[in-house]
Image: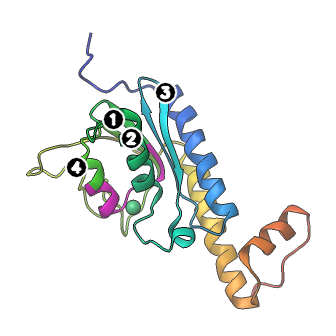
Amino acid sequence: MATELPIIDRVSDEYFMGEALRQAARAYAHDEVPVGCVIVRQNRIIARAANQVELLKDATAHAEMLAISQAQVAAGDWRLTDCTLYVTKEPCPMCAGAIVHVRCARVVFGAPDLKGGAAGGAMNVLQFPTLNHRAEITAGVREDECRHLLKSFFQERRLAAATGTAASDLIDATRSGEKPGPESE
Ligand SMILES: [Zn+2]
C-alpha cells in the first residue's frame, strides 16, 4: 500500500547493518577509522564501502561517499530516491550533504556522533527545512557493536602512539592472546 514510504523493517535493518559492520571491520584491519556503509535498493545491496581516507590520502573518501559513487554507477542515475543507506557511524556534514544531493530516501546508522554528526547528533543536515530533500532517519541500529569498533580502534591508536607500535601489530597481538604493552594513560 504505502509504496512511497520507505519500508522500515528492524530485522532487515539489523541484517544490513551487519553488512556495514563487515565493511567497518575491513577498514579497521587496514588502520582506517572503522566506518562501513552499504546502500540497499529493493532489499538488494547495490554498493558497499569501507572508509579509505588513509589509503587514498583523500579526506573525502568516507565510506558513505565511496558507497554513493558506487550506487550511482549501479543505478545508472545520480538519484538514489528509492535507496536506504546503512552506515555504522552517524554521517558527517559532508556525507549528509551528499545524501541530500542524491535524494536518498532513508539513512540508518549505528553509533551517534554528538560532536560532528549531521543526522541529528550535532546538527540535522538530512532534514534541514529549507533544503529540497529530506531523508528518513533511523538511529541506533546495532549501536553497541558500531560504537565498540570505533572505541577500540581509538584506544589502540592512542596506545600505539604511546608505545610507537603500529595499530595493526597491536591487533595481531590481541588476537593471539598476548597483551600489548602497558597502557601509559
Ligand atoms: Zn562523512
Structural distance between the alpha carbons of marks 3 and 1? 16 Å
Q: Mark 4 points at which residue?
A: 101
Asked if 130 appears above or below 43 in the picture, the reply is below
Per the rendered image, the range of residues in magenta is 86-97
Q: Residue at x 20, y 43 (%)?
A: 134
Closer to the camera in the image, 134 or 97: 97
Q: Mark 1 points at which residue?
A: 76
Q: Residues within 10 Å of mark 3 (few under 14, many from 20)?
A: few
Q: Residues within 10 Å of mark 2 (few under 14, many from 20)?
A: few
Quadrant in which the C terminus appears: bottom right
Q: Mark 3 points at which residue?
A: 44
Instruction: Point out the frontmost of discs 1 and 4.
Output: 1
Whole-percent x and y of residue 18?
Answer: 60, 40
> In terms of sequence position, does the residue under pointer 3 or pointer 4 come before the other?
3
Which quadrant of the frame does ligand 1 lie within?
Answer: bottom left
Indicate left or right for 11 with 59 as reference.
right
Asked if 47 appears above or below 3 in the picture, the reply is below
Q: Name the residue under label 2.
A: 73
Indicate left or right for 134 with 62 as reference.
left
Closer to the camera in the image, 163 or 77: 77
